[in-house]
Image (spheres, rainbow, N blue to C red):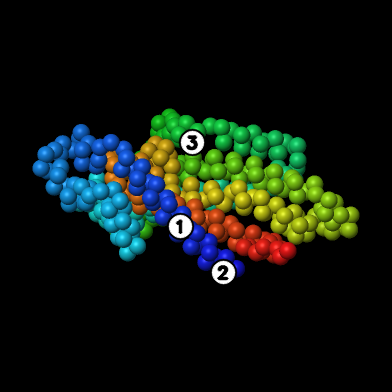
Amino acid sequence: MLGYILRRLLSLCSVLLVVSALVFVLMNLVPGGPFTLADRGYSGAALENLERKYGLDKPLHVRYINYLTSALQLDFGNSFSVAGNPPVTELIARIWPVTFQLGLYTILLSFGLGITLGIIAAYYHNGIVDNLVTFVATAGIAVPNFIIATWFLLIFGFQNGWGVESKWIIGPIVPGGAAVLSWDYFLPVLTYALAPLALVSRYTRSSFSDALTADFIRTARAKGLSERFIMLRHVFRNALIPMITVLLPQIPNLLTGSLFIEVVYGVPGLGKFFVTSIFNRDYPMIMGLVLLIALLWGLTYLITDILYTVIDPRIRLGETKGA
């Protein structure tokens, strides 16, 4: 197992290298640069000095090698577009806690409620609960989250006069501040959770339905085993593997933010900042955020493979059968 994990981590390093190279090249192939945007007004000597200061006047391959050398020392450069040109790592450390907490609460709600509803729907197959869960799952996947966010603003914000003014700046963004679970999280988390909740309940229902109709379940019932024992010992374990395969990769998406949710509710999170960095041609921020997302994806798939062996000890990772 340890050897497999080490090989996967080395493979992840190579993936990060390829991703960084592709993003770096594509980012610099776009005409213009971070200091040639119309709203900045740099030209002539000022533009040349800025490009020289940040190394943008050097050939592409030299800039990439310099970036890799610095990145290996955990120096991902300084932002071009944020006032004061703070380091990329410092900005991510300030911004990501907001998105991380929003994503964490979303995961707890969508996975907890979605798995519960999926199990109930599978157990009462083709019943009223099953049809209701299927309808909610279909609606949750079909309706975009920015539409749902707009509905929630109309219902809870303007029509009832409750107000949805966000206090996101207090807490996670302030250095040393501590964010707490409050009503500021309610609407964003509820909106953000509907789509993954629908997906979780749908795949949970499918996995449990397949497990409940398997031959070994009928054999277990014929032996007189209690329904509770069958559900916990046989159905749940056999249904987990297909669920993990589909559901765990949702976690990086939820932990890195949603542009639409963050824009509608005014959340100063990672998703909104990522898009802003792209428009501002903030090369160091783009590279830093892309590498963070790629790292989360790689670690998630590694954890998924490890969980396979925990759920089913018959699975052996990285082994091949002899001739």
Residue at screen point 61% across, 45% down: 200
- Snapshot quadrant of residue 121: top right
The spot of residue 83 in percent (x, y) is 21, 48
Which amino acid is tagged 2?
Gly
Residue at screen point 75% across, 42% down: 124
Which amino acid is tagged 3?
Asn
Q: Nearer the viewer, residue 9 or 165?
A: 9
Dot 3 corresponds to which residue?
145
Q: Which of disc 3 and disc 1 is earlier in sequence?
A: 1
The spot of residue 26 in percent (x, y) is 36, 42
Q: Which of disc 1 and disc 2 is earlier in sequence?
A: 2
The residues tagged by marks 2 and 1 sit, at their Cα atoms, a distance apart of: 17 Å
Query: In this rendering, would 220 be left or right of 95?
Result: right
Dot 1 corresponds to which residue?
14
Quadrant of the drawing holding the N terminus = bottom right
Which amino acid is tagged 1?
Ser
Give the crowd class for mark 3: few <14, some 14-19, many >=20 residues within 10 Å: some
Q: Which of disc 2 and disc 3 is earlier in sequence?
A: 2
